[in-house]
Amino acid sequence: MSGLDKNRKRNHMVSFRVSPEEQRELEARIKLTGMPKGKYIIESVLNKQINITVGKYQSDRLSIEIQRLYKQLQCIDSNSEELIALLEECKVLMEQFINITK
């Protein structure tokens, strides 16, 4: 394995644990930015701020995520655990959207 990392620009791995709620919030923020997960985490840790510029690409990404959630909501039984988890994801996504549009 070490031979595979020899010529890589970024050859060190960093990992950390998060709670399920923190993971949902992190994933929602990453989806809203349209950035790759690694780039988002590096930028947020090193620069301490992520600026989301609203443009066609970001709007399309947000639209795709909202459509995905809508389709999943249509297919789920109203009393299931899956619905509760999906609604939590919707809540986090909407909170992030409200924060970036202020």
Image (spheres, helix red, strand yellow):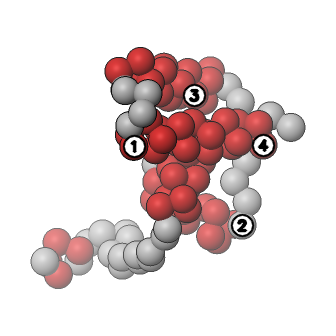
Q: Secondary structure at mark 2?
A: loop
Q: CA distance from mark 2 to mark 3?
A: 23 Å
Say which label, 2 or 1, has the lower sequence index: 2
Say which label, 2 or 3, has the lower sequence index: 2
Q: Which mark is residue 81?
A: 1
Q: Which residue in the protein does label 2 denote?
A: 48
Q: Viewed as shown, does residue 80 lie left or right of 35? A: left
Of badges 1 and 3, nearer the viewer stands: 1
Of badges 2 and 1, nearer the viewer stands: 1
Do labels 2 and 4 touch, CB within 8 Å? no
Q: Residue at x 61, y 61 (%)?
A: 43
Place residue 83 in its image quadrant: top left
Q: Viewed as shown, does residue 80 lie left or right of 92? A: left
Amino acid under disc 2: Lys
Is disc 4 surrounded by few (<14), some (14 to 19) or many (20+) residues within 10 Å?
few
Q: Which residue in the protein does label 3 denote?
A: 62
Do labels 1 and 4 touch, CB within 8 Å? no
Amino acid under disc 1: Glu
Q: Which residue in the protein does label 4 denote?
A: 99
* Residue 91 shows in this picture: yes
Is disc 3 surrounded by few (<14), some (14 to 19) or many (20+) residues within 10 Å?
some
Amino acid under disc 4: Asn
Say which label, 1 or 4, has the lower sequence index: 1
Where, quadrant-wise, is the N terminus in this rendering?
bottom left
